[in-house]
């Protein structure tokens, strides 16, 4: 892996370009073999009339990309899925950032380390079993009602199983650790001295938060948002089990195209459309953020 | 303020552990359908002890998860360093390429892998499963480590180098300790991604070889028993014990950052 | 009569001899084989531990499993794993489609002696046929019909009960396009496999909106929700209803509606690429043996056997026997092969209905 020496002042005989290449190649080579090439195959399928197996004739078509035009009811489904992503990400951010601040400011040493692990531990249980546990908590006269009634005996049921909010609860639970930990990684590095200096200069708490904490937490918030928003809009397990009739998302539609209709081309076209939407959302979002959040 | 923060964090932990507590409780509940009222039994643990299939699947899952964690964390961290520390052409593209593995539903990625591995002769088996698991975990590692790297201070590393350290030495002496919290967090996520990964294992495992999530997902058509809760509870207990031992033994302050 | 029997016996011998010869020459690995791989749903008969133990004792053949979670996954696994499977469970609605791709071997019934006892209506079902030859051995059949709570809805007769005012918020539907479209088709007195008016079906299903509480996709989910009292009326699998009664003591009653139920027939097939065909056929023969079926049905709970003799041997009060009456077979409409475009139309219709429920 020796690269011709460039005129730039390179240390130890390796040009910066070669170092960069050496750092990124293993990851992207791995991703290429295991994910990108298979997905390219799927991308090709999405322009065919059927997956190219067996002896039936297959033709090129762009028709699958007109899926939202041909099936107008899917537009609403897609919007609901995006809203689901936005709700889940927003709630995770509202809970996750303060939790990360609390973890990094209110605890020290060993306690903090144990708490850090405790945040991620629920993640190590099986997702499906966790969702079934939520059904027991959220159903009418379920465990949540029991807890409330322990304090207020005649409380009306607040069971929300088989509804849109139930899906949000399940998804927030499934993804919250991402937000807490990415935010934690960002805010743990904030110097106490900076905050104290700001306070001693007379800055009030909201100002300190807006001018210092938020910009420093931004990388964590953004990474957490990516890790939550992106998979949530394609989620299908939580919607199916917790959502009842409300559990129709673009994720379940894609799954049905694969498992029930056996229409890989249509299913993959839908996924690629959603991927494009995700990329656009993030392009717009990061442009908007660039102006606001970076420290200048 | 501190007291309020503590209270808030404990409330969040309460939310995170509510279904986990239910999961563990159901491992000790007599009803195979999670029906209440609660009726204590150790029956499911006894059943589990005789369920070689489920135990073997659990062992496979843990082994693959460990392998995945090591590979994905190392490979992903290297890429994260390049993506957040070095400016080069195509950096934005490489960052965007992290999104498809997260955005495309696992079912489609799994199907695509099955077909592609069949066409190219990679085939099925442990190698194919690890190939898939690591690939799915890499983007998570890159994003998490990247989030941490953005805030570690380049000036310290540069200071070390201006004092005569080699870049490699500066990296090990200064950057790596700063990176430690991110690396641990990333490794924990990679482990979680692999441990819960169902579709890839299910499409790519050799027939007859199974993992815990595969056992669970393929049995829901007919129904899984609280043995699954029992094995999950044991995994959870083992992890907790490991964490406590780890916290007692380490002095480096693994995840606490600089303080 | 005598000549017929003689000819049959002669054919049997001839067939077995030819098969053995062919297998012996073309598949050298077959003789040494002591392990076969079966592709099936998890927990669906072929992987009962006691049965596999017994089979291994009788034949010395070990059976390992690979599973699928939907019919398309079964098809995909067959396509992408040549040589991996010796026996595959295939819903007969798919058999001819898979045979058409050359993925299956035609079945010579002479090599499966127990097939003589199969109900002819099922054994000779046109669903198994492709190019004039059968590609599957009928194994079990069942119905998707009404599964209702005994104290709330016993005595329901018609599918219309799902739309009735007393069922508001108390209905669970099965998340399967073929089934749900078929239910509406039955109400209109049309073919479940080729209904005339899809628009009317969509409207009819949409009208159920206030009644539908949840849409289930696994037996596990149905059992857990039913036992928690979440619904009283449902579209359910006949075999699962017997299991829910027996294993979990759930108060469910399976009803074949006056309009009819949706029949399905599952068969066992041998992939063309199977490395151990003779062993595969002997396993299939064991699977349709009344001895296996009776134990499976009475101890675990199973759909109805395609083997008429096996059904006779069930105890008279067995829930599966009470649910799966042989006389249904004459009028039951079975899920049958359909062109891809029509399958897509079914899924689109059901997707539109679900989107409407969610809105």
Image (cartoon, coloured by chain):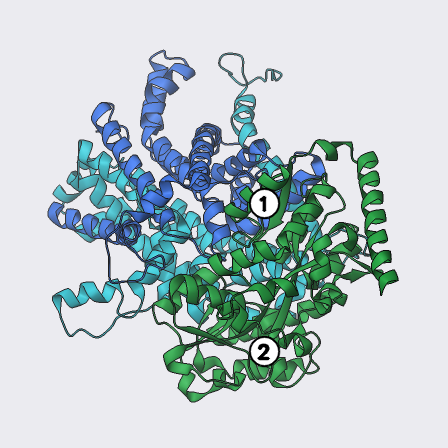
Q: Which chain is cyan?
A: A
Q: Residues within 10 Å of mark 1 (few under 14, many from 20)?
A: many
In the picture, the quarter occupied by the C terminus of chain B is top left
Residue carrying label 2: C183
Say which element carries label 2: helix
Q: Is residue C280 left or right of residue A139?
A: right
| The one of A73 and A153 positioned closer to us in this rendering | A153
Residue A117: x %, y % from top left: 28, 38
Q: Is residue C34 visible?
A: yes
Q: Which chain is blue?
A: B
Residue placed farthest to the bottom in the image? C165
Determine which quarter of the picture holds residue C140. Answer: bottom right
**Nearer-N-terminus badge (1/2):** 1
Residue shown at 13% from the left, 50% from the top = B4
Q: Is residue A248 visible?
A: no
Q: Chain of mark 2?
A: C
Q: Answer whether labels 1 and 2 touch (C-beta < 8 Å).
A: no
Q: Chain of mark 1?
A: C
Q: Which mark is residue C181?
A: none
Residue A274: x %, y % from top left: 55, 57
Say which element carries label 1: strand
Q: Is residue B247 left or right of residue A51?
A: left
Q: Which mark is residue C66?
A: 1
Residue A137: x %, y % from top left: 29, 61
Residue C169: x %, y % from top left: 40, 79
| The one of B100 and A257 positioned closer to us in this rendering | A257
Determine which quarter of the picture holds residue C250. Answer: bottom left
């Amino acid at each position: 892996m020796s690269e011709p020496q460039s005129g730039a002042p390179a240390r130890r005989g390796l040009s910066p370009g070669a170092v960069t290449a050496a750092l990124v190649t293993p990851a992207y080579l791995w991703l290429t073999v295991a994910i990108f090439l298979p997905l390219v195959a799927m991308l090709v399928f999405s322009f065919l009339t059927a997956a190219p197996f067996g002896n039936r004739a297959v033709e090129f078509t762009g028709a699958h990309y007109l899926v939202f035009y041909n099936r107008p009811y899917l537009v609403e489904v897609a919007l609901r899925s995006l809203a689901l992503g936005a709700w889940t990400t927003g709630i995770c951010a509202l809970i996750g950032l303060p939790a990360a601040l609390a973890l990094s400011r209110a605890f020290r040493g060993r306690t903090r380390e144990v708490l850090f692990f405790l945040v991620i531990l629920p993640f190590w249980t099986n997702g499906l079993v966790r969702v079934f546990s939520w059904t027991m908590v959220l159903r009418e006269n379920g465990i949540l009602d029991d807890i409330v009634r322990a304090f207020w005996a005649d409380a009306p049921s607040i069971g929300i199983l088989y509804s849109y909010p139930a899906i949000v609860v399940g998804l927030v639970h499934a993804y919250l650790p991402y937000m807490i930990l990415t935010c934690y990684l960002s805010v743990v590095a904030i110097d106490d001295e900076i905050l104290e200096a700001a306070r001693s200069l007379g800055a009030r708490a909201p100002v300190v938060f807006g001018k210092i904490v938020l910009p420093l937490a931004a990388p964590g918030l953004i990474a957490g948002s990516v890790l939550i928003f992106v998979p949530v809009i394609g989620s299908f397990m939580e919607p199916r089990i917790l959502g009842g009739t409300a559990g129709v998302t673009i994720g379940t539609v894609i799954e049905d195209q694969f498992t029930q209709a056996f229409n890989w081309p249509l299913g993959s076209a839908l996924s690629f459309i959603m991927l494009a939407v995700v990329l656009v959302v993030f392009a717009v979002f990061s442009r908007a953020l660039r102006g606001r959040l970076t420290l200048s | 303020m501190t007291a309020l923060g503590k209270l808030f964090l404990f409330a969040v932990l309460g939310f995170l552990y509510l279904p986990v507590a239910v999961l563990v409780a159901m491992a000790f509940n007599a009803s195979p359908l999670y029906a209440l009222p609660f009726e204590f039994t150790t029956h499911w643990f006894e059943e589990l002890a005789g369920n070689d299939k489920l135990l073997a699947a659990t062992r496979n899952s843990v082994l693959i998860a460990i392998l995945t964690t090591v590979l994905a964390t190392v490979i992903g961290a290297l890429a994260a360093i390049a993506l957040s520390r070095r400016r080069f052409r195509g950096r934005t593209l490489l960052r965007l390429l992290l999104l498809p593995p997260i955005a495309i539903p696992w079912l489609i990625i799994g199907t695509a892998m099955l077909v592609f591995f069949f066409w190219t002769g990679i085939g099925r088996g442990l190698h194919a499963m690890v190939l898939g698991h690591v690939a799915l975990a890499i983007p998570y590692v890159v994003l998490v480590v990247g989030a941490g790297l953005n805030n570690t201070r380049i000036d310290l590393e540069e200071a070390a180098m201006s004092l005569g350290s080699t870049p490699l030495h500066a990296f090990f002496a200064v950057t790596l300790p700063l990176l430690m919290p991110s690396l641990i967090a990333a490794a924990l996520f990679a482990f979680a991604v692999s441990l819960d990964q169902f579709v890839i294992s299910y499409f790519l495992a050799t027939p007859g070889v199974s993992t815990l999530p595969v056992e669970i997902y393929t049995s829901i058509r007919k129904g899984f028993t609280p043995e699954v809760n029992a094995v999950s509870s044991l995994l959870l207990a083992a992890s907790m014990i490991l964490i406590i031992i780890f916290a007692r033994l380490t002095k480096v302050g693994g995840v606490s950052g600089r303080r | 009569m005598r000549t017929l029997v003689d000819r049959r016996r002669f054919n049997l011998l001839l067939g077995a001899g030819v098969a053995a010869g062919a297998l012996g020459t073309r598949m050298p690995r077959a003789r040494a084989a002591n392990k076969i791989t079966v592709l099936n749903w998890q927990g669906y008969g072929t992987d009962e531990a006691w049965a596999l133990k017994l089979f291994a004792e009788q034949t010395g053949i070990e059976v390992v499993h690979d599973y699928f979670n939907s019919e398309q996954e079964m098809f995909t696994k067959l396509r992408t794993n040549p040589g991996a499977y010796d026996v595959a469970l295939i819903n007969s609605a798919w058999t001819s489609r898979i045979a058409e791709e050359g993925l299956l071997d035609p079945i010579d019934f002479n090599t499966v002696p127990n097939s003589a006892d199969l109900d002819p209506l099922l054994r000779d079902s046109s669903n198994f046929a492709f190019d004039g030859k059968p590609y599957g051995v009928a194994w079990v059949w069942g119905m998707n019909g009404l599964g209702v709570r005994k104290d709330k809805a016993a005595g329901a007769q018609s599918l219309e009960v799902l739309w009735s005012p007393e069922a508001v918020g108390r209905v669970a539907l099965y998340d399967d396009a073929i089934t749900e479209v078929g239910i509406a088709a039955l109400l209109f007195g049309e073919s479940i496999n080729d209904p005339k008016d899809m628009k009317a079906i969509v409207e009819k299903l949409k009208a159920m909106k206030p009644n539908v509480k949840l849409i289930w996709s696994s037996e596990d989910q149905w059992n857990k929700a039913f036992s928690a009292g979440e619904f009283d009326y449902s579209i359910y699998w006949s075999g699962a209803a017997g299991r829910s009664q027996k294993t979990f003591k759930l108060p469910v009653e399976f009803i074949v509606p006056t309009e009819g139920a949706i029949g399905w027939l599952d068969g066992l097939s041998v992939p063309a690429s199977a490395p151990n065909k003779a062993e595969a056929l002997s396993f299939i023969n064991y699977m349709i043996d009344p001895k296996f079926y009776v134990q499976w049905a009475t101890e675990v709970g199973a759909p109805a056997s395609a083997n008429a003799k096996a059904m006779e041997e069930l105890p008279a009060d067995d829930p599966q026997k009470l649910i799966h009456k042989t006389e249904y077979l004459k009028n039951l409409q079975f899920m049958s092969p359909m062109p891809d475009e029509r399958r897509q139309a079914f899924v689109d219709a059901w997707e539109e209905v679900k989107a409407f429920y969610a809105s």
